[in-house]
Image: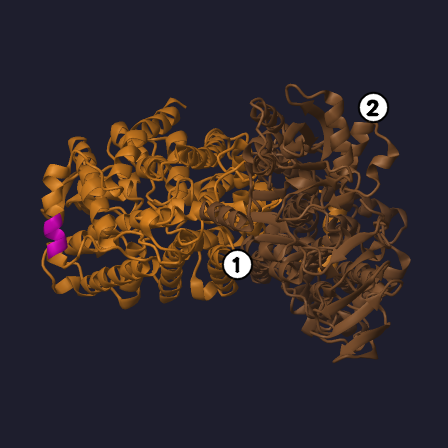
Amino acid sequence: MPSQSPQKKNVFAPDLVRVALGQSVVKLDPRNMVRNPVMFVVEIGTVITALFTVVNLMNGQAFAYELAITLLLLFTVLFANFAEGLAEARGKAQAASLRSARSDTKARRLEGDREVLVSSLDLNKGDRIIVSAGEFIPGDGEIVEGVATIDESAITGESAPVVREAGTDHSGVTGGTKVLSDQIIIEITSNPGESFLDRMISLVEGASRQKTPNEIALSILLSALTLIFLVVVATLLPIAGFVQTSVSITTLVALLICLIPTTIGGLLPAIGIAGMDRALRANVIAKSGKAVEVAGDIDTLLLDKTGTITIGNRQATGFTSVRGIPAEKLYEAAHLASLSDPTPEGKSIVQLALSQGSHFPQTIMDGATFVGFTAKTRMSGVDLSDGRSIRKGASNRMRTWVEEQGGKIPVDLEALVDDVARKGGTPLVVAEGNTVLGVVSLSDIVKTGIQQRFAQLRKMGLRTVMITGDNPLTAAAIAKEAGVDDYLAEATPEDKLRMIREEQDKGKLVAMMGDGTNDAPALAQADVGLAMNSGTQAAKEAGNMVDLDSDPTKLLEVVEIGKQLLITRGSLTTFSIANDVAKYFAIIPAIFAGTLPALSVLNVMRLASPTSAILSAVIFNAFIIPILIPLALRGVKYTPKSADAMLANNLLVYGLGGLIVPFIGIKAIDLLLTAFGWI
Amino acid sequence: MIDVVLIYGLAFLLAWPLGHYMARVFRSERTWLDPILNSLERGLYWLIGINSTQGMTWFGYARALLFSNLLVGVVAYLVFIFQGSLPLNPNGIPGMSWDLALHTAASFITNTNQQHYSGQAQLSYLSQMVGITALQIVTPAAGLAALVAILRGLFGGRYASTATAGEPRDLGNYYVDVTKAITRVLIPMSLVLALLLTWQGVPSTFEGAKTATLVDPQGEVTEQTIPVGPVAAMVAIKQLGTNGGGWYGPNSAVPLENPTPLTNLFESVSIILIPIAIVFMVGYFTRRKRFGMLALGVMTVISVVLAVTVIAAENGSNPTFQGLAAAGPNWEGKETRFGPTPSALWATLTTQTSNGSVNAMHDSFTPVGGMVPMIGMLINETYGGIGVGFVNFLVFLFIAVFIAGLMVGRTPELFGRKLEAKEVKLAAIALLIQPLLILVPTAIALSFPDLTGNSNPGFHGISQVFYEYTSAFANNGSGFEGLGDNTIWWNVTTSANLILARFIPIFAPLAIAGFLAVKRVAPETAGTLRIETPIFAATLVSVIFILTLLNFLPVLVLGPIGEQLVAVPEITASVDQEWVQASRALFGRPQ
């Protein structure tokens, strides 16, 4: 992972805690609390017990118990608010560090032919600005003219400069990055406050935050449980009255708060925000919370071969000359044809040729003209001053070239070419004039560890499809080596779109990554469309996430973030509900033993006294929230495995754990209270 | 013990093929009764004016179910009110009061058969046949039809493959499903059972009550009137159709309803036969046998735990009898012909299945023994009432899938269809109404004992009232009795309870099924939650126990658990007096 801007490893970083502490009080506003029904009930309970405290105080009766319960309930609410505040603060801090780069800078806006100096904050969508080497880019946009190398380390942490060029799939630039060379004209693509980053910030901010669909569904279930326990506790008083048992309202409120799912209710907003935050930490800007949630449901991943499955560049791995041509001649020709080829493939050919002992007089290059690769000719090479003309290129193109000059295609060429392709390489045919010399094989280097990664994904039920422009033979070989489930060879953007639709028709959710304008329809069609930040504006608009690192492996990370978010919700819900059993065992004997002495045998935890039992349960209920904050913010530990294994594991930890932990916790609190003589 | 194994074993043995047959019936595949019934059913459809090929959406299905039930409910109500002036009344029984008629009608259109009247004394033969027996046939059929429609919805409805996206799905035709349930399942089976019972001596006649001269006259009493009638037919459907309402007040404890060990075996098996067959049916009907097995496993585990508990409780000694000659199994309120084990088994089976017939008095069980029937009714889905038991099971399945589904890192889905806010909301309503409709009226009734007239003070009094509302909510119909329950309070509150508790738990899942049907179906992969596994089954059992029992734990503590604890001298002796004093200091002494 690239070195990232302020990574708060510590969940409780002091500066963030300070912000969160303030927020936990501010959020007590009932208009805010009502958004979270479970905690709203706790707040109302607090008010009720506070009233009883005051009434007792004014009547000169003992009020310590009522006061203790009131304070504990207040803390329960504050802790929940603190969790939400802390999650927000972390998210905002992360976003702020990304945004800090784009503070108020000067921008040269083009108005007609004039350049006007304006503040970067006044740039609007559609404005054209000019940026020269050494200047910072004042806002997000797309290069409309020129090509430049840009230092994006402020955003991605990656120090190597990148090339961005108008009219290509790499025309996107981000505010706060620095132009290292050349001069470009940029069209600004967002109004102030409307950039993707701004949108993301609004997703972690409390007031404007939209609940995600699954969060809403879970909230409904939690609200129903709250209502159920409200009925249970409210009817308890008249039912107990039938056997002449009176229970104070304060104790009933305490019982209610212990039974309703406050643990998950208090942490639910924090979990959602933390999910967005984790995406942001991975340098992924999600345009909606829903997108992160959906990522967990992805069934099919469309992965670009280059950069995801293979390391970015192909390497020359061998020369094979056709029958009758000495190997040295092929080395020399390939070497010459690649001398001025700036691509990594070209450089690797030169290196391989040198290592094979290729040599030629320095003077041979005098007066030579280089022929660069163009989309039209699809070959490159050199025309030497002695009249020799050397070319390398794709096999079918080279055949035509040789035949055009009246040359003959050697009979063994086809076999050589196919052989390279079958082994997963890309064959480049080298020819001099009308004579075919041989084949250079360029091989994709499959990333180490990628097979295991795909095996994990398969265990998780994800299908991986490799997308490549290679011919089917090469694609099949690489697909086999990498262990993907399927591949799409000679893929055009239309093919991608069609494949996504086909998968979706089978009910699957599809994720893909793309950067080009012609990827836009597929990005929009995919359930998770992750656009590279280096990509065109059209691609970034079409996708529902933007990866600032433009790293193709990010898709896997995004899926994991989505899954982790859902698992954290489910596990803490299970934990919260399972806790109720122990709380009953603490509170029921305490309440009813007065009338029904035999019930004291249900005091299986041997708690010191009824007061201590009730207080211990309420204290446990309150403090479990801050204890679980790190878990809620970091997410439940997630290792890719099958659903069955994951369920078994999480049930054991959070289900069984949720049954046992409160027994231990409540007993420990009871011992502490007794030891300090507070009871 | 052998009788317990025999009853469970025989029920499973018969339920398996029966479930397979029922699945064929509802999938409209060929069955051996086709030659006779096809034309008969066509005649019936023509008679009531139904286009049998017309499918219904979930809403249309719900509407048809509600209206047809309402219609028969009103007819039954009028018959009860006016039975005094209607024919088939050889014993001259007068009409019912409005509230008793309301309760009786509500009780019978909801497949509950809670009785605040005594059958042989307060119902004419016409009422027994039209009001009671007819409803006993129609209502289980309605429950079964609802289940079949819901199952269709969970898998996309009929003709799922040709439906266009977003189009409301065809969940079947309610009238056709009900008719088939009656003609092809309930009537043929009742016929067989009625004949078996008649063979064993259960009355089956239209003649009036018999008068017998006592062999051993007691003072002025020299002769006895023995009410008879078409008893066998009614007993058959009451047992098979999870109805429970008997011809005689004391139900199957009366020798005329349950004369021999063989009839007790037949009747016990009949309680659970169709409910278990339905679980087999689900596996075949949905073509997911493993799903059927999951349900069967979960239900059987719960069923056996309850059965073992109540049998142990009733065979254990009553603590207050220690050292007395009466020590030993709890015989109080039991037919000596049956004894503790068959009575206890019947008690738990009849409450697990929402049947409600009894062959012993639950009120006289040991406190823990009496709690088991309450728990059976609170869970109400092992194996549950006909159709509706499995529908209740589905509600818990939705909740368990929602929670467990999250834990595997996907938004929860059942059979590939996502459970979202709308579905969760409906399932939550189905969960919520149980404590609402049981605890609220229980609390009110216990606050005004004079108004509600329950006979016992203390814990047992709480148990009685709680039992009555639990029984009404579960559409069970068995009674703890000991309540003067033919009053306006009881009749009206339980009527409301019966109707809401019948239709909301049917309509909410029906709507869920309707919503799920139109959703896009995700293929099952290694990343999908598989529900047909032991680990999910364990989750489901936990969810069922936690979400039903936790809600009622306080009232169970103040009822049967308290009663049991007080009764055991060892427990009362080991009480932590300091703790008790402290609790009193905190909450005030008992008055």
In this image, B20 relative to B75: left or right? right
For disc 2, the marked residue is A357
- Chain coloured orange in this rendering: B
The stretch in magenta equals B42-46
Drawing shade for chain A: brown
Q: Nearer the viewer, residue A90 or A318?
A: A318
In the rendered image, residue B238, in percent from the top left (x then y), is placed at 26, 44
Q: How far apart are labels 2 and 1 at the CA level?
A: 70 Å
In the rendered image, residue A234, in percent from the top left (x then y), is placed at 59, 63
Looking at the image, is A128 positioned above or below residue B158?
below
In this image, A629 relative to B301: left or right? right
Tell whether position B44 is magenta.
yes
What residue appears at the point 72 percent right and 49 percent down from the top-left corner?
A: B580
- Can residue A379 be seen here? The reply is yes
Neighbourhood count class around disc 2 (C-alpha, 10 Å): few under 14, some 14–19, many 20 upward: few
Looking at the image, is B581 positioned above or below residue A386?
below
What residue type is disc 2 on? Gly
User: To which quarter of the image does residue B382 belong?
Assistant: top left
Tell whether position B249 is magenta.
no
In the rendered image, residue A245, in percent from the top left (x then y), is placed at 63, 58
Question: Which numbered mark, 2 or 1, is in the foreground of this view?
Answer: 2
For disc 1, the marked residue is B421
